Amino acid sequence: MHASHDLILVLFSYVIAVASSYTVLDLAASAGQARGIRRWRWLAFGAVLMGMGIWSAHFIGMLALNLPVPVKYNLLKVLLSITAAVLGSFLALAVIARFRAGLRQLLGGGILLAAGIAGMHYIGMSAMQIGIVYRYGYVVLSIAIAYAAAYAALWLSFSAMTGNEKQSGWRKLGGGLILGAAIAGMHYTGMLAAQFEPDHMHGDLPGVVLEQKWLAYIIAGGMLFTLWLSLIGLNISRRFSRKDTKILVNEKWYRSLYENNQDGILSVDLELRIIGFNPAASRITGINQETLEDRSLDFFLNIVVEEERGRMHELFSRSFGGEYIGYETTIVHQEGHRVDISVINAPVTVDGQVVGTYVIARDVTEDKQVKERNHYLAFHDELTGLPNRRMFNQLLEQAIEAHSGKQEPFGVMVLDLDRFKMINDSLGHLYGDLFLQEMSNRIRNSVVNENVILARLGGDEFALLCRFTRKQMNVTDIAEAMIAAVAQPYHLKEREFYVTMSIGIAFYPYHGQDPVQLLKNADTAMYEVKKNGKNDYHFFSEELNGELLERLELEGDLRKALERNEFVLHYQPQVHEERKAIVGVEALIRWQHPQRGLLSPAVFIPLAEEMGLIVELGKWVLREACRQMHRWHEAGGPLVPVAVNLSSQQFHQYNLLEEIVGILKESGLAPEYLELEITESMMMNANISAEVLSGLVKTGIRISLDDFGTGYSSLSYLRLYPIHKVKIDRSFIRDIVTGGEDQAIVSAIITLARHLKMDVIAEGIETREQLDILLDGGCREFQGYYYSRPLPAHEMADMFLLAARTS
Ligand code: C2E
Ligand code: MG
Ligand code: MG
């Protein structure tokens, strides 16, 4: 029997096969991502769609077949064939929907799908109430085609799920085309296998005759419409799920920000319940997450230090009103210590409504400590811990402000340690610092009073603010207490050191209206004390102002005096009383001031020391004295030494020895004719002193100890140093005629010196009486007005040296 195909319908059947395959592969991707019941739903939907597609393609193919006789269909078998297609599709989809399909699953899936397609076809064929004879070669071929194509389609669509979106689109289309080809190929090969035999028409069997063409178009149209709808639905659902995923990812990002944040974050809703609490919040408060969950905000507010709680409540009600608030507060950690936190209350608004607030807290304890430390350092002296100059000025300003309306007085003191510079020079800065610490402690402890503020202005200079009103007596009490505290001996390196303090006092408002003026005037008063022998206090007065000006002027002149050659040396003889012979001369400096006349070293030596000019000046004295003595020697003698006074700074000059040796060479004076006068107070550091002295002595220079007896130092240490001569200080000689202590001390000194094989000389002899007592005591050498005042060089030569030569 001849059968022909309607070509348009054949095309339709292929298009449907491809479209349904493509749709289903697209669907399988979604099914693969879904889980649980959703996954089964996707699979069922896909299986029905695919099964129906396969069946439609087949059935349209059948309807495209033009048989010369009308054919009846057995509807039950038709339904059965649909079921086979759906079942095969379902199983195949279940395989590909599993992401990790291995080769075995693919093979299995291919077999199932092919079985579904082939089953559908041959059951469908058997629904035709017409005699069919099969050519089994084609049947086998049709099944083989079904299998090969199903396998290829499955493999392609499986790989489509793993590629990127573009690749996956092409692969799905490829899968669709191949699967479509499988269905069509199978169908038409299957049709080749069939030989219709109209003679064996089962005309009497029950069944329906179908109006073929129209039916075919209706099925094709319906099917394509269904597929089109499915694709649209699929796309929409996918877009939604993409959005879901995006939201999910965003949420994860936010969670991470929340969980890993270094700042503690607390979320609080409008019912004042804590609904969120991140790990950093746990760390900062020491409260674990479970304890806080679902607690009321009050629980949290209770760990805020008590004095802050009221403010906290207020701040929170403001932030619930939508205000963004930043503040600092302090909480108590669960372990008991305080934690300073910097907090932001950030209201959470949803659709314009405040629904709660975030409390974002940062632990700033360390920052705050650093800040406080910096602030402390900016306003305190590091060495003593006392307020520094900056802070003192501020406090002084505040005091002035507080007193300004009332015109009530208060006192400002400037304190200066008298011999600190020497201690610092001779002991070194390390001990100098220790010494300063000790002194500042003593001063502080001697004036413990809330109305008194002690500050260190720098170096050995302190300042005191006394906020007493109209009680000047208190100020003098304080000054005396401080002086007494400092005067106590200071023990260091098994030695005792003695220092004193000079204090200047000025009063607001009489002596100044502002900090600068007050401090300057107190300073002036302090210098007055220094000038008058130190170790005392003095109030500022207007006359002092004049003296200050004079002092400043003198400082200016002193700077120029050396280059203007305004210094001269006077010489005072030292005499051996019994031999009636001159045994030496002391060189004593004078300043020939252009306006003020001849100035005593007592006026300008301390100034030169303070200004740092003394080393230069001392060098000049040494050179001049050596030259002069050499000239006298050249002129015929007598061959006696010249004594030159050294200052403490010179003594500690690192290149002293070198310099002196240079000067001796230059002047031509033999070393044994130079005698250096040093004082006990210069030799505070025994090691350094011994080193300097032995260096000098080795070159042949002589050493004499000036002002002996005033330096508080013990006599026993004398033997440690190479000293040739001891000069008994003038202060002992002055009162020696009245007998008593001084006489005893002087004779003790003479005995000791003899014992140690040192020469002794008494200075400041003014009367015969003094001389006689000293002669009785065993002293033989003398220096003083009794013999001669210090004289200019030519007078010295005339009066003594010439006489000595002729005698
Ligand atoms: P000094 O070394 O103890 O010198 C002795 C001082 O006593 C001298 O005072 C001298 O004029 C004075 N004098 C001597 N005999 C008598 C006396 O009988 N009665 C009284 N009342 N005084 C007497 P001057 O020259 O005013 O020197 C004072 C101090 O200045 C010296 O004390 C010394 O420490 C220092 N001086 C002097 N010249 C120099 C110098 O060139 N360099 C250094 N660094 N200091 C010097
Ligand atoms: Mg002297
Ligand atoms: Mg002296």
Image (cartoon, rainbow, N blue to C red):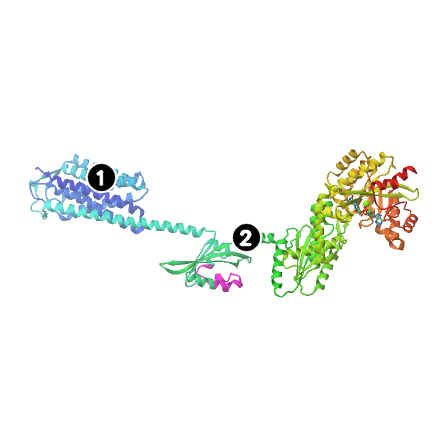
Q: Amino acid at mark 2?
A: Glu
Q: Amino acid at mark 1?
A: Leu
Check residue 177 in the rendering and tell me which mark sits there, or answer none. 1
The magenta stretch spans residue 300 = yes
Identify the magenta region.
292-313
- Label 1 and label 2: CA atoms lie apart by 70 Å
Q: Which residue is mark 2?
A: 366
Residue 473 location (% of width, % of height): 72, 64
**Callout 1 environment at 10 Å: few (<14), some (14 to 19), or many (20+)?**
many
Check residue 531 in the rendering and tell me which mark sits there, or answer none. none
Instruction: Report ligand 2 position as a quadrant.
Output: top right
Image side of residue 765 versus residue 323, left or right: right
Q: Who is closer to the viewer here, 446 or 502?
A: 502
Figure quadrant of residue 616:
top right
Image side of residue 120 versus residue 591, left or right: left
Q: Is residue 406 visible?
A: yes
Q: Main secondary structure of the magenta part?
A: helix
N-terminal of the pair, mark 1 or mark 2, is 1
Residue 369 location (% of width, % of height): 56, 53
Residue 674 location (% of width, % of height): 82, 38
